[in-house]
Amino acid sequence: FREALALGTMENFFFLAEQFRTQDEPTFCGLSTLAMVLNSLRIDPMRTWKGAWRWFNEQNLGCCAGPDQVREAGMSFDMFKCLATCNGADVVGHRGVTPEEADVNPEAVKAFEDAFRAAVRAASCSE
């Protein structure tokens, strides 16, 4: 932590850390994660949360699915992408390597991990 802070690569951590929340329901891990990320990216929800506050939470992310549907059935990868996109995020989805693909091509796992790390680094860099 200290090393990253000293190198100046921790700026985005603080935006994310101040948005930390626990999920309200067992099936809301995706909704809670998405609310944290959208708020840390400072994306305007274009609607109020409470009073004059404009903030994302698990209850106001609806467009592809509402909290009641997620409570009952959970959330798929495609639903997560849809909710992120319709709430203002610029989303490019990257699916991981399936166990079957890893059995056939073990290098595919490393290639995916390397690409994922590169994408996270690129998205986390200060402009």
Image (cartoon, grey):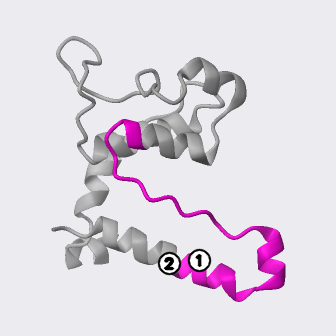
Which of the 4 image quarters holds residue 85? top left
Pointer 1: residues within 10 angstroms few (<14), some, or many (20+)? some
Quadrant where the C terminus lies? bottom left
Q: Amino acid at mark 1?
A: Phe
Q: Please, which residue is most extreme toward the top here?
A: 51
Residue found at x 59% / y 77%: 112
Q: Nearer the viewer, residue 51 or 5?
A: 51
Q: Which residue is mark 1?
A: 112
Residue found at x 59% / y 84%: 111
113 relative to 1 in the view: left or right: right
Dot label at residue 63: none
Q: Amino acid at mark 2?
A: Ala
Find residue 58 and report its horizontal and vertical position in percent. 46, 27
**Residue 11 appears in the picture as rendered:** yes
**Decide: marks 2, 1 in contact (CB < 8 A)?**
yes
Specify start and end residues of the magenta stretch as a single range.
85-114
Dot label at residue 115: 2
Q: Nearer the viewer, residue 74 or 51?
A: 74
Find residue 30 and report its horizontal and vertical position in percent. 55, 40
Which of the 4 image quarters holds residue 95? bottom right
Residue found at x 69% / y 70%: 97
Find residue 41 and report its horizontal and vertical position in percent. 27, 48
